[in-house]
C-alpha cells in the first residue's frame, strides 16, 4: 500500500470528514500600533562609586571654586548619589561635575556653613537634584514651586531665583530701604544689582543719586550671627531675640567675645608656629634665643607649672574678694599687675590705653603656685579646671589684642580666606556683591558734578531746648543750602536734661515743643529737605529710656525717638516735597547704636552716641605701681602738655601711629633674649611736646576700644546691655570703614587707625550755650565726612 505523502506546511482541518474549508494562519502578525506618547528616557545603569575616586573632582569643585570643605560623610553621600543617577558616564560625559556644581551652588544659596556636612540640609539638596535628573544629567532644578537654572541657581531667603542674565537685570529698581525679611548670610541678599555692562547706559535717577543706595540699619534689625568654634565660621543665630532671655544668654556674651578675639589672634602671624623653613634655620644658626611666635596658655594649663612664664588671654574682672582676676573659658586665676607695663604707649601715661574690668587683654608674666589651693581664698573649694586656680599670676606686660584690618577679616585681596561670604549687615556679602558695589560707588562718587553729594554732615549733642543750639543749627544748615550733602546725621541728647523725669522743663510737652521748634527751623531750608536724608540718633536723655534712668546710663541698644514727638518734622518734609520737584528727602529715626550702609558692603558706618571716655576714666585699673616707685619719672616727664591745637591739623590720609599695636608679622628675634617675653610691639615714637593733650586722649580712647571688637567692653553691672542683641549690634568685627563715636566730653577729632576712620563731632555748641540765651562768642563745631575718601574733617564757625 502506497504511503500518502503530504507537504510539511499542510494544515489539517478540524472537521471529522476533512470537508470544512481551510483558513490558513498568517505567517507573521502585524506589529501593534505605537502608543500616543513614548517618553525617550535613557536607561542608566547604577554603579558603586568609591568616595576616593570622586574626591579629586569634588575638591576641585567645592574647595577651589566655591571655598567649601567636604567632610567624609558628605563625600560618601555625593558619591552614592552620583553613582546611582549618573552611572558610568559620570566622568566621560561630565555629568558628575555638573551635579557637584549644582550641589555647591544650592548649599551656598541656603546659607550653609563652610564645612559641608551630611545632614538634613544636604539630604534636601540631593532630593531637589533627584527630581531634576533626566538621563543622568541635571536638567531644570525645581525647589518647591520655583525653577532654578544653572545660570541662576542661587536661592535666597524666600527661595526665589535671581535672574543674573542681562535681560533680567534691566528695569530693576534700587533696593528697598524698609524693614525686609533677613536673607541668608551668603549670596546677593536683597540687593537687586544691575548688570555691569549697563553701568554706562543707565542714567535713571534711582541709580545715579548716591542717596538712593543709603540704608540705615537699626540695631534691632541687624542680622544676628554667632561664631561656631568647631566650624570656625559665623552661622546665623537660630534663637529668636527676646528682651527677657534666659540666664544662659548672659554667659554666652563673654564666650562669644572671647571666641571672636581668640580666632582673630590666632590668625595673626605673630601667633602662628613657623615651619622648618630656611629663615627659621638661619635664625637658629645666628643663635637667636627668643622665639618669633607666641603661644597662648589656657588658665587651666597653669596647674603644676609654677615658676614658668606664660602668655594669657582672658577677661579682666574684679573677683568677689576684691582682687583682680583673669577669666577664660577654662578657669580663673588671681592676677597681680603691680609690676606690669603696657605693651603700647611706652612710659607716657597719656599714650597708654585704658585697662578696665570687662576687657579682654593679653598678660605676659610668671605663674606662682600656691600649695594651699584655691580654698585659701576664703571662697570655698572652687579650684580645679573650670574654677579658680590656686596661686596667682604676676604680670610683667599687659596689652590689648592686636587689631585686624577689615580686608584681612573678610579675606579681600591677596589674603584669601576670611568671612567674605557672611552678610553681617543684611545688605549682601562682600564676596557676592562687593566688587559690583565698589564699581558702582566709583562711578557715582568720582564724577565732578557729584562732589557735593559725597559729603555727610555729622552733629552731636543737639540740645533743642537751648536757643544757642537752634542758632548754631541754623548757621550750619545755611552753609549747605547751595550744595546739599547726602546726609545730615543729628545725634542726641536732644534735651539738656533727662526727659520725662517729672519736672516741668523735661515733661512730654516740653520735649515735643523742642522738636516743633526744630521742624520750624527745617521748614526754612526746603532744598535740604528735598535733596538730603536726615538721620536722628538718640542719647541717654531721650525717651523712653530716660523716664527710667533719670540721666544715668541707659540700656543699650535702645530704640529711636518715638513717633509721638516727631509728627511735626514729618509734616515739614511732606510740605517740602509738595512744593518742590520730584526729589524726595526723608527723615529716619533710628536706634543707638546704628549702622549706615552706603553701596551695600562697600561702605559701612557705625554710629554710637555715648560718653565712653569718661566711663573709661572712671573704671580704669591702676597698673605698675611698684615699677613707678622703683624708677620715678623726672619732673619734666610728669607734666602733661595742655596746648590747644586743632585736631583737624593732623594728617588723616593714612593711619596714625598711636601706640605701636601688634604688627601683622613677627619681628626679628631680640638680642640678648629677655626672661619674660612680651608680644612684639612696634617702636613707639616719643610724643611731641607740642601735641595737644585732647588729641592724646582721643588716641588713648581709640587704642582702647578698637582692639576689644565691641562698643561696650564693660561688665554688665557697669554698662547694662540687651543680652540677645549685644553680640551683633555692638560688635566691631569686622572693623567698619568708619566709626562715628559721638562723645560730648571730648573735643572734636578725626583719626584713622588700622584703616578705620574714627570720628567725634563733639558738642554742637562748644563754648557756652547753657545759660539759656544766645550770647556772643559761641563756637559751633561739627564734622564733615567724605563718603568717597572715607575720611572726616573737623569744621568750626563762630556765631554771635
Image (cartoon, rainbow, N blue to C red):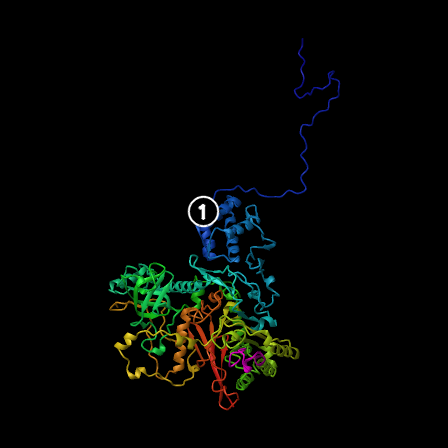
Nearer to us in this view, 521 or 437: 521
Outermost residue, top direction?
Answer: 1
Residue 406 pos. (x, y %): 44, 68
Residue 73 pos. (x, y %): 45, 49
Residue 748 visible, this orientation: yes
How many marks overall?
1
- Secondary structure under the numbered disc 1 in the rendered image: helix
Residue 653 visible, this orientation: no
| Figure quadrant of residue 717 | bottom left
Give the answer, above or below, for where 512 lies relative to 217.
below
Which residues make up the magenta segment? 495-511
Horizontally, is 780 left or right of 687 in the view?
right
Horizontally, is 733 left or right of 484 in the view?
left
Residue 321 pos. (x, y %): 35, 68
Nearer to us in this view, 354 or 108: 354
Nearer to us in this view, 331 or 639: 331
Residue designated by label 1 = 51
Residues packed near mark 1 inside 10 Å, few (<14), some (14 to 19) or many (20 plus) = some
Horizontally, is 587 left or right of 75 in the view?
right
Is residue 505 on the magenta stretch?
yes
Quadrant for the N terminus in the image: top right
Is residue 410 on the magenta stretch?
no
Residue 10 pos. (x, y %): 68, 20
Give the answer, above or below, for where 667 lies relative to 84.
below
Amino acid at each position: 500500500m502506497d504511503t500518502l505523502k503530504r507537504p510539511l506546511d499542510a494544515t489539517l482541518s478540524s472537521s471529522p470528514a476533512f470537508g470544512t474549508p481551510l483558513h490558513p494562519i498568517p505567517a507573521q502578525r502585524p506589529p501593534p500600533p505605537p502608543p500616543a506618547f513614548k517618553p525617550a528616557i535613557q536607561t542608566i545603569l547604577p554603579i558603586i562609586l568609591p568616595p576616593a575616586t570622586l574626591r579629586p573632582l569634588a575638591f576641585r569643585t567645592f574647595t577651589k571654586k566655591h571655598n567649601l570643605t567636604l567632610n567624609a560623610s558628605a563625600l560618601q553621600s555625593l558619591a552614592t548619589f552620583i553613582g546611582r543617577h549618573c552611572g558610568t558616564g559620570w566622568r566621560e560625559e561630565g555629568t558628575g561635575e555638573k551635579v557637584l556644581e549644582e550641589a555647591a551652588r544650592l548649599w551656598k544659596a541656603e546659607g550653609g556653613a563652610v564645612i559641608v556636612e551630611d545632614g538634613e540640609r544636604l539630604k534636601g539638596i540631593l532630593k531637589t537634584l533627584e527630581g531634576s535628573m533626566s538621563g543622568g544629567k541635571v536638567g531644570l532644578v525645581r525647589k518647591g514651586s520655583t525653577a532654578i537654572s544653572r545660570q541662576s541657581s542661587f536661592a535666597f531667603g524666600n527661595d526665589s531665583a535671581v535672574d543674573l542674565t542681562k535681560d533680567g537685570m534691566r528695569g530693576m529698581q534700587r533696593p528697598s530701604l524698609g524693614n525686609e525679611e533677613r536673607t541668608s548670610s551668603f549670596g546677593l541678599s536683597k540687593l537687586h544689582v544691575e548688570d555691569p555692562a549697563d553701568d554706562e547706559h543707565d542714567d535713571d535717577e534711582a541709580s545715579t543719586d548716591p542717596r538712593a543706595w543709603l540704608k540705615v540699619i537699626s540695631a534691632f534689625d541687624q542680622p544676628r550671627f554667632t561664631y561656631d568654634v568647631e566650624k570656625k565660621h559665623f552661622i546665623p543665630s537660630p534663637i529668636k531675640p527676646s528682651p527677657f532671655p534666659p540666664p544662659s544668654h548672659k554667659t554666652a556674651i563673654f564666650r562669644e567675645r572671647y571666641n571672636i578675639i581668640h580666632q582673630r589672634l590666632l590668625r595673626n602671624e605673630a601667633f602662628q608656629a613657623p615651619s622648618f623653613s630656611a629663615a627659621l634655620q638661619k635664625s637658629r644658626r645666628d643663635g637667636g634665643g627668643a622665639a618669633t611666635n607666641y603661644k597662648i596658655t589656657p588658665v587651666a594649663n597653669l596647674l603644676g607649672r609654677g615658676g614658668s612664664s606664660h602668655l594669657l588671654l582672658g577677661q579682666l574682672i574684679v573677683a568677689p574678694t576684691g582682687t583682680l582676676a583673669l577669666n577664660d573659658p577654662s578657669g580663673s586665676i588671681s592676677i597681680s599687675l603691680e609690676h606690669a607695663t603696657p605693651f603700647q604707649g611706652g612710659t607716657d601715661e597719656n599714650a597708654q590705653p585704658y585697662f578696665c574690668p570687662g576687657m579682654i587683654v593679653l598678660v605676659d608674666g610668671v605663674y606662682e603656685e600656691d600649695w594651699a589651693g584655691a580654698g585659701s581664698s576664703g571662697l570655698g573649694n572652687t579650684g580645679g579646671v573650670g574654677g579658680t586656680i590656686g596661686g596667682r599670676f604676676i604680670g610683667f606686660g599687659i596689652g590689648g589684642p592686636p587689631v585686624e584690618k577689615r580686608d584681612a577679616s573678610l579675606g579681600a585681596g591677596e589674603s584669601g580666606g576670611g568671612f567674605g561670604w557672611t552678610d553681617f549687615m543684611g545688605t549682601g556679602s562682600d564676596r557676592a556683591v562687593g566688587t559690583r558695589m565698589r564699581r558702582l560707588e566709583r562711578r557715582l562718587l568720582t564724577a565732578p558734578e557729584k562732589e557735593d553729594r559725597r559729603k555727610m554732615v555729622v552733629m552731636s549733642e543737639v540740645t533743642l531746648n537751648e536757643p544757642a543750639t537752634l542758632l548754631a543749627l541754623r548757621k550750619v544748615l545755611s552753609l549747605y543750602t547751595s550744595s546739599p550733602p547726602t546726609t545730615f546725621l543729628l545725634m542726641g541728647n536732644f534735651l539738656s536734661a533727662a526727659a520725662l523725669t517729672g519736672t516741668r522743663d523735661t515733661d512730654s510737652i516740653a520735649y515735643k515743643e523742642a522738636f516743633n521748634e526744630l521742624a520750624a527751623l527745617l521748614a526754612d531750608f526746603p532744598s535740604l529737605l528735598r535733596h538730603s536724608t536726615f538721620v536722628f540718633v538718640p542719647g541717654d536723655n531721650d525717651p523712653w529710656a530716660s523716664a527710667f534712668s533719670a540721666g544715668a546710663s541707659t540700656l543699650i541698644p535702645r530704640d529711636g525717638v518715638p513717633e509721638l514727638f516727631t509728627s511735626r518734622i514729618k509734616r515739614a518734609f511732606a510740605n517740602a516735597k509738595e512744593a518742590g520737584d520730584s526729589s524726595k528727602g526723608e527723615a529716619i529715626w533710628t536706634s543707638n547704636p546704628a549702622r549706615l550702609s552706603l553701596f551695600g558692603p562697600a561702605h559701612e558706618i557705625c554710629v554710637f552716641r555715648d560718653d565712653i571716655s569718661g566711663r573709661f576714666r572712671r573704671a580704669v585699673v591702676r597698673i605698675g605701681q611698684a615699677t613707678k616707685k622703683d624708677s620715678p619719672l623726672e619732673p619734666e616727664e610728669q607734666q602733661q602738655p595742655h596746648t590747644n591745637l586743632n585736631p583737624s591739623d593732623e594728617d588723616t590720609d593714612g593711619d596714625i601711629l598711636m601706640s605701636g599695636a601688634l604688627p601683622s608679622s613677627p619681628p626679628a628675634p631680640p638680642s640678648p633674649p629677655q626672661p619674660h617675653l612680651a608680644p612684639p610691639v612696634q617702636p613707639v615714637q616719643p610724643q611731641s611736646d607740642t601735641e595737644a593733650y585732647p588729641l592724646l586722649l582721643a588716641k588713648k580712647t581709640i587704642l582702647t576700644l578698637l582692639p576689644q571688637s565691641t562698643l561696650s567692653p564693660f561688665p554688665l553691672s557697669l554698662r547694662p546691655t540687651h543680652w540677645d542683641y549685644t553680640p551683633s549690634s555692638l560688635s566691631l568685627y569686622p572693623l567698619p570703614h568708619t566709626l562715628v563715636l559721638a562723645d560730648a566730653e571730648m573735643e572734636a577729632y578725626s583719626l584713622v587707625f588700622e584703616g578705620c576712620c574714627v570720628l567725634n563731632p563733639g558738642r554742637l555748641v562748644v563754648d557756652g550755650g547753657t545759660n539759656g540765651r544766645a550770647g556772643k562768642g559761641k563756637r559751633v563745631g561739627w564734622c564733615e565726612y567724605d563718603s568717597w575718601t572715607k575720611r572726616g574733617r573737623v569744621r568750626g564757625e563762630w556765631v554771635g
